[in-house]
Image (spheres, helix red, strand yellow):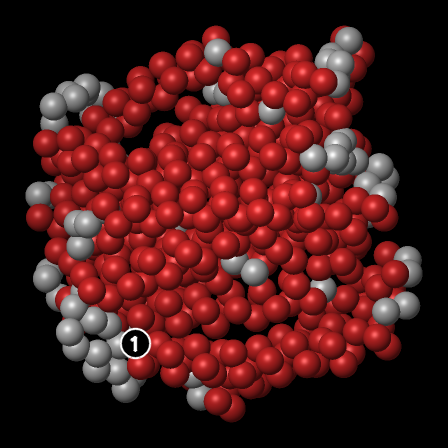
């Protein structure tokens, strides 16, 4: 095996970073609206009966969404669609796209009907302890049936996103989830106000808002799809070679993602048996940690996938290794300081965002503890988002499956050991442990499968990132005590104090990376300076 550190970052770094930047802006908009959505939930319903029911109800179609739509389907479709676009021409490509759309519309519709019929047994399986509280299981079943068709909308939206990404369109599909949150907030609030007048619970309005948001997520991408030349061929051929190849690529990935869903099932089951509010505390914390995961990990994954697929199709393994290594450095340069910031500032962040209305000080403490434990696995979660597309590009999807099931074992073992002492915090810790083990496993396997990649270059970059993060962490610890009164005061003081801490800490970190000379970072800052001077 060879491990020749590259003196320079990959030639694709600037292009990937530019595409990822566009995706990050869109994802940031979506995540901010998502946080507003969670604020609405926290203010209206707090952390208890109604929100616990909503979280479990939404988890059922959301698990299948992760399984079929935004995970296996998206990655498999991009791989095959890129090959068709490169080698087979426009007509064959759009015929494949039409066949995939029809096939998955029929398949997901059938799954939705099954879910509507079996909603009660599914809820009892996910949260059996809800039956101990009068009306909680019944409310969860009602919300599950309202939200299940959401799966159809987001599955088709994922296929359309894959088409647009392959055609170099990243911003609009990434922005589509913003419309999901917008529909959820506007539609949900309107119906939450209206439905109680007809004897329905207000939380049911938020469930209908979720369905409205899912429809908007699909529809807002359609005009851009038409602009890139999409032609709809309404054919259904389950034996089409392209469709079969997508399904074969999906199969191991779906099995691997099912391991993630097993983890979520286990976590939900344990959380439902903890103190009331535990499901909600974990949900609020995970929603917040998804902000950096989406902005860093998901954005880079979306941007790097078509590049890796093209390099693999051209058998350019040298460029593929460089692209992967530089992408991993970029992920770490964003995820590692984000982890430090979330751990050190968990309580003031949760207080500022959620502690309003029915969400009280106890909820803040419990949610902040969960956030700190979730954040420990942030770097691994984000890195895996970049690593899995490499396995797709080289046509080997078995090992991500194995890594996922190793994560299941680590998750169950950790929860069993710590749940009595840490309660819901133990569930957040077990999730991070599972992600870290999966990351380490995939790192070793990928090194062997690629006959080595620039490990020395990667470690040198990580060392610089850790030094800059340590400087940033020291600054946060130094500045927090003088600002403690501000961060527990009124809203204006909290915003000012936390904003000052975050902005100054980011400045310290950026200055540290610039002084240490991280190649990916200095390349991008150099390009920005050139553009600024030209303008």
- Decide which of 456, 215 is in the foreground and name it: 456
Q: Is residue 111 above or below residue 222?
A: above
At x 48% / y 72%, what residue is drawn? 333
Residue 35, image x and y in percent? 66, 46
Q: Residue furthest bottom?
A: 515
Left or right of residue 332: residue 317: left
Residue at x-position 62% and y-position 14%: 142
Residue 221 vs 153, above or below: the answer is below
Q: Position of residue 334 (x, y in %)?
A: 50, 68
Query: Could one spot residue 302 in this view of the protein?
Result: yes
Q: Is residue 138 above or below residue 156?
A: above
SS class, disc 1: helix
Q: Residue at x 43, y 77 (%)?
A: 462
Provide residue 203's location: percent of width, then percent of height.
71, 23
- Figure quadrant of residue 70: top left
188 horizontally vs 23: left or right = right
Q: Residues within 10 Å of mark 1 (few under 14, many from 20)?
A: some
The quarter in which the N terminus is drawn is bottom left
* Residue 221 horizontal/vertical position (percent): 41, 38
Nearer to me, 202 or 389: 389
List the residue tagged with mark 1.
455
Is residue 394 toward the left or the right of residue 211 in the image?
Answer: left
Q: Is residue 396 left or right of residue 221?
A: left
Q: Is residue 225 visible?
A: no
Label total for image: 1
Q: Residue at x 31, y 70 (%)?
A: 325
């Amino acid at each position: 095996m060879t491990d020749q550190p590259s003196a320079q970052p990959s030639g694709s770094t600037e292009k990937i970073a530019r595409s990822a930047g566009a995706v990050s802006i869109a994802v940031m908009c979506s995540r901010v609206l998502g946080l507003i959505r969670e604020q609405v939930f926290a203010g209206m319903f707090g952390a208890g009966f109604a929100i616990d029911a909503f979280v479990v109800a939404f988890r059922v179609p959301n698990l299948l969404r992760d399984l079929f739509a935004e995970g296996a389907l998206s990655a498999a479709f991009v791989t095959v669609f890129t090959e068709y676009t490169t080698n087979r021409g426009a007509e064959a490509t759009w015929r494949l796209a039409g066949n995939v759309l029809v096939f998955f519309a029929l398949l997901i519709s059938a799954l939705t009907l099954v879910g509507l019929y079996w909603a009660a047994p599914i809820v009892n399986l996910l949260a059996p302890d809800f039956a101990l509280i009068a009306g909680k299981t019944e409310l969860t079943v009602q919300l599950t049936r309202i939200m299940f068709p959401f799966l159809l909308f987001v599955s088709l939206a994922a296929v359309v996103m894959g088409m647009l990404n392959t055609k170099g369109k990243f911003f609009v599909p990434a922005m589509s989830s913003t419309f999901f949150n917008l529909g959820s907030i506007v539609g949900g609030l309107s119906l939450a106000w209206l439905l109680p007048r007809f004897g329905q619970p207000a939380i049911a309005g938020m469930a209908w808002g979720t369905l409205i948001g899912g429809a908007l997520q699909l529809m807002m991408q359609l005009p851009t799809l038409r602009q890139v030349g999409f032609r709809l061929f309404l054919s259904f051929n389950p034996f089409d070679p392209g469709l079969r190849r997508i399904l074969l690529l999906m199969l191991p990935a779906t099995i691997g993602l099912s391991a993630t869903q097993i983890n979520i099932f286990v976590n939900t089951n344990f959380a439902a048996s903890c103190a009331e509010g535990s499901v909600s505390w974990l949900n609020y914390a995970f929603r917040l940690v998804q902000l950096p995961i989406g902005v860093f990990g998901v954005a880079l994954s979306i941007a790097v996938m078509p590049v890796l697929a093209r390099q693999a199709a051209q058998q350019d393994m040298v460029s593929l290794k460089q692209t992967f290594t530089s992408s991993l450095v970029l992920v770490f340069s964003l995820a590692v300081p984000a982890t430090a910031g979330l751990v050190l500032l968990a309580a003031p962040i949760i207080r500022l965002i959620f502690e309003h209305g029915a969400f009280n000080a106890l909820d803040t403490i419990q949610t902040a503890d969960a956030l700190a434990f979730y954040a420990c696995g942030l770097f691994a979660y984000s890195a895996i988002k970049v690593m899995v597309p490499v396995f797709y590009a080289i046509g080997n999807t078995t090992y991500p499956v194995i890594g996922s099931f190793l994560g299941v074992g680590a998750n169950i073992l950790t929860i069993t050991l710590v749940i009595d002492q840490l309660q819901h915090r133990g569930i957040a810790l077990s999730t991070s442990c599972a992600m870290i083990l999966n990351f380490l496993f995939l790192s070793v396997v990928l090194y062997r499968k690629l006959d080595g990649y620039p490990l020395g270059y990667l470690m040198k970059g990580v060392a610089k990132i850790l030094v800059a993060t340590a400087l940033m962490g020291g600054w946060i610890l130094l500045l927090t005590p003088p600002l403690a009164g501000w961060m527990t005061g009124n809203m204006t003081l909290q915003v000012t104090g936390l904003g000052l801490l975050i902005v100054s800490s980011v400045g310290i970190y950026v200055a540290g990376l610039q002084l240490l000379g991280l190649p990916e970072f200095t390349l991008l800052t150099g390009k920005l300076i050139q553009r600024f001077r030209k303008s």
